[in-house]
């Protein structure tokens, strides 16, 4: 959607620029003296700081732009595409007067999937009674996290984007007029979902838990049972059966057995020690001790036969290859996934590390 005001050309600034150029070239510059040259050399050395200036406002093609303004921008090389609508976050002007801008982009209705668009509420009742109801609906924008860095010459004029907390407020408060839009939701291109722009502190009686009345007498039941007497969990450790010193000696013996087994399987003493030093080894030893009714001698006999078992009685957990050493290639792919997808570990595993 191109703006009528943005369609104005740069005619207003052409004459002024030509007048400034003529005034600058009408008289020859004075010949610098040796003293002036020495001063200019010192000033160049002192000013060797940042190459760019970041003004709060800048005039481009006769239009004054300020940080925070919403404006149109033409994508370079694509003059037939609709203008980009974005919010000015940064302006830079180099020493050669080459200006550039960075915009936070608004997405249009056609950029949002239909499922995400319809999930945020029905828009059929919006702007009822307005003869341009359909056009008003198309003025809805969605603020995204996408940024565009463009030459300042790509800007095509300012526009206005009104923010509303919900669709009802937008229907009541927005008025259709040239170069005016409205925004209610944020859009994430990565998750392809919409989220509300309104933040809310959940304090008050409506956000409090409803507690039942206190009972003085509680019936005696299994420690892991619910109110109906059903036991949903299985205990994997019961304290008090062994002294701390005896338990520590048992864990050391289990780690020694696991280190020897790791050396035989992995072919390296260091890798065997690393495998034995993990929490997984201690957990398996404790599972074996629990399954054998805390009989240390019997548990050690079982560990001697199978130092890397997953519980003597088949209990415990099976972690597959989670404990296998990470190669440099796996670490590199994981770091690449964190840079690309953030903390979306499911996607990192699916896209880059399916074997982990």
Image: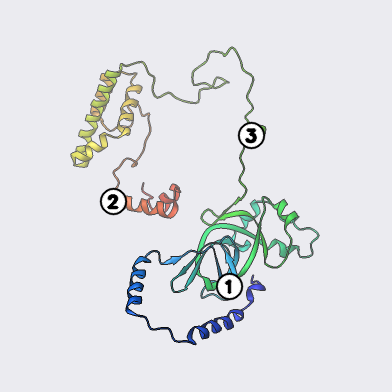
Please state the horizontal and vertical placement of residue 186, each as a whole percent of the image: 59, 54
Please state the horizontal and vertical placement of residue 91, each as a whole percent of the image: 51, 65
Instruction: Look at discs 1 and 2 and give the one toward the viewer.
Output: 1
What residue is disc 2 on?
A: 328
Q: Earlier in the sequence, mark 1 or mark 2?
A: 1
Residue 167 is left or right of residue 36, and the answer is right
What residue is disc 3 on?
A: 207
State the residue at coordinates (30%, 16%): 243
Who is closer to the viewer here, 303 or 178? 178
State whether residue 239 is above or below residue 123.
above
Q: Mark 3: few, some, or many residues within 10 Å (few <14, many ≥20)? A: few
Q: Indicate the secondary structure of the residue bearing disc 2.
A: helix
Q: Mark 1: few, some, or many residues within 10 Å (few <14, many ≥20)? A: few
Q: CA distance from mark 1 to mark 3?
A: 47 Å
State the residue at coordinates (32%, 50%): 331
Q: Which mark is residue 81?
A: 1
Whether residue 82 is visible, yes or no, is no
Residue 227 is left or right of residue 138, and the answer is left
Who is closer to the viewer here, 93 or 277? 93
Instruction: Look at discs 2 and 3 and give the one toward the viewer.
Output: 3
Q: Earlier in the sequence, mark 2 or mark 3?
A: 3
Q: CA distance from mark 2 to mark 3?
A: 48 Å
Q: CA distance from mark 1 to mark 2?
A: 45 Å
Q: Which mark is residue 53?
A: none
Please state the horizontal and vertical placement of residue 333, each as a whole percent of the image: 35, 53
Who is closer to the viewer here, 10 or 180? 10
């Amino acid at each position: 959607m191109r703006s009528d005001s943005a369609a104005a050309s740069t005619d207003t600034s052409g004459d002024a620029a030509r007048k400034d150029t003529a005034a600058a070239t009408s008289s020859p510059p004075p010949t610098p003296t040796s003293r002036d040259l020495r001063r200019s050399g010192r000033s160049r050395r002192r000013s060797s700081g940042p190459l760019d200036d970041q003004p709060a406002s800048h005039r481009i093609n006769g239009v004054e732009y300020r940080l925070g303004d919403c404006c149109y921008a033409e994508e370079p090389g694509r003059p037939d595409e609709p203008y980009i609508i974005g919010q000015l976050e940064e302006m830079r002007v180099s020493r050669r007067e080459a200006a550039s801008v960075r915009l936070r982009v608004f997405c249009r209705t056609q950029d949002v999937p239909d499922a995400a668009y319809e999930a945020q509420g029905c828009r059929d009742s919006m702007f009822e009674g307005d003869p341009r109801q359909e056009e008003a609906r198309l003025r809805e924008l969605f603020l995204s996290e996408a940024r565009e860095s463009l030459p300042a010459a790509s800007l095509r004029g300012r526009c206005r984007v009104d923010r509303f907390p919900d669709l009802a407020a937008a229907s009541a408060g927005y008025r259709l007029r040239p170069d005016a839009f409205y925004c209610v939701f944020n859009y994430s291109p990565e998750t392809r979902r919409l989220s509300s722009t309104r933040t809310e502190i959940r304090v008050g009686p409506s956000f409090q838990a409803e507690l039942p009345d206190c009972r003085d007498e509680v019936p005696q039941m299994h420690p892991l049972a619910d109110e109906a007497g059903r036991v949903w969990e299985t205990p994997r450790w019961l304290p008090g059966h062994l002294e701390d010193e005896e338990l520590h000696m048992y864990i050391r013996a289990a780690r020694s057995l696991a280190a020897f087994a790791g050396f035989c399987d992995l072919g390296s003493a260091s890798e065997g020690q690393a495998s034995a030093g993990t929490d997984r080894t201690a957990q398996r030893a404790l599972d074996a001790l629990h399954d054998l009714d805390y009989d240390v001698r019997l548990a050690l006999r079982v560990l001697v036969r199978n130092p890397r078992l997953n519980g003597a009685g088949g209990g415990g957990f099976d972690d597959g290859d989670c404990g296998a050493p990470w190669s440099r290639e796996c670490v590199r792919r994981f770091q690449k996934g964190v840079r690309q997808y953030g903390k979306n570990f499911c996607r990192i595993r699916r896209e880059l590390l399916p074997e982990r």
